[in-house]
Amino acid sequence: MNRYYLLLLILAIVSCKQGSQDMHELQEDTSDDVIVYEEYMGEEPTEPEQTEIYEPVPPVVDPFGNNGVPSDAIVLFDGSNFDNWEMAKDSSEVVWHLNDDGSMTVKDKAGDIQTKQKFGDVQLHIEWRSPAEIQRDGQNRGNSGIFLAGLYEVQVLDNNDNDTYVNGQVASIYKQHVPLAKASVPTGEWNTYDIIYHAPEFNSEGGKTKSGTITVIHNGVLVQDHVEIKGAMTYIGWPKNPPHGKGPLKLQDHGDNSRVSFRNIWIREL
């Protein structure tokens, strides 16, 4: 074998070894990023029955069981009374307006209302409407808020031809997350929010060990996609994280004659 072919052979061997070493190093470098599912470890199944699960059996829910409300939902407001609600400031009877059309409307400067029952993880359905008669602008037009656990606000606002700061616009997680889209119906018509809330978790010393999350679907459009709750809503300053357990659903009186109305409120505990 002449020197030329011998040199090519040596280069090929070195290149092969180097490639093998690089691949090994790559595998080592990325091993921490590989997702491993414990239930899928062990011997590979050889029959379809080995990967079939029969228990626990999910409960049966009629999605339209009670006037279009899922059969396992708690109806918080059906337009007939305020039995499930109280004034947030002193737990007294609600003094907001109960309307003939099955809705309720904020009574200006009366204060927020909240549910008597407290909730953790939930699916919430709520419909709201800003007044057809436009008054004011910015944050003072059709402003209210839906507070999960009494702390975390999904913004209610008439943003039609009415721009404001985007982390405070309609369907924002107030001062924390800008919505993916603005999906409002025309002013004076009914909007729908479907909200999934998972509560944060705290240790025995009061430190937050897991952030809560919120998903919001506005009139059928996904606008908040499982976003992290950074803390309780604050108008001025950074979000804070006071330890808490279950809390009430709260509806805001913004105090500027916003005249926001609500109807068809139900909730499912998750």
Image (cartoon, grey):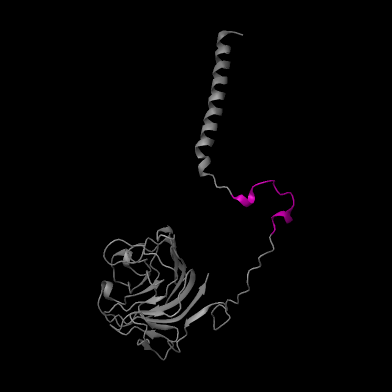
* Residue at 72% over, 54% down: 50
**Residue 196 in the image: above or below residue 131:** above
Q: Is residue 247 magenta?
A: no
Which quadrant holds residue 145? Answer: bottom left
* Residue at 52% over, 74% down: 268
Residue 40 on image: x %, y %: 64, 50
Compare residues 27 and 12 and report the one nearer the observer.
27
214 displayed left or right of 106: right
Q: Residue furthest bottom?
A: 100
**Residue 137 in the image: above or below residue 29:** below
- Quadrant of the rendering where the N terminus is positioned: top right
Which quadrant holds residue 95? Answer: bottom left
Could you tell me how many numbered marks the image carries?
0
Q: Residue furthest front?
A: 205
Residue 163 on image: x %, y %: 29, 68
Residue 266 on image: x %, y %: 48, 78
Compare residues 78 and 207 and report the one nearer the observer.
207
Give the magenta range: 37-52
* Residue at 30% over, 77% down: 254
Compare residues 134 and 29 and report the one nearer the observer.
29
Residue 251 on image: x %, y %: 37, 77
Q: Is residue 38 magenta?
A: yes
Q: Residue furthest left?
A: 136
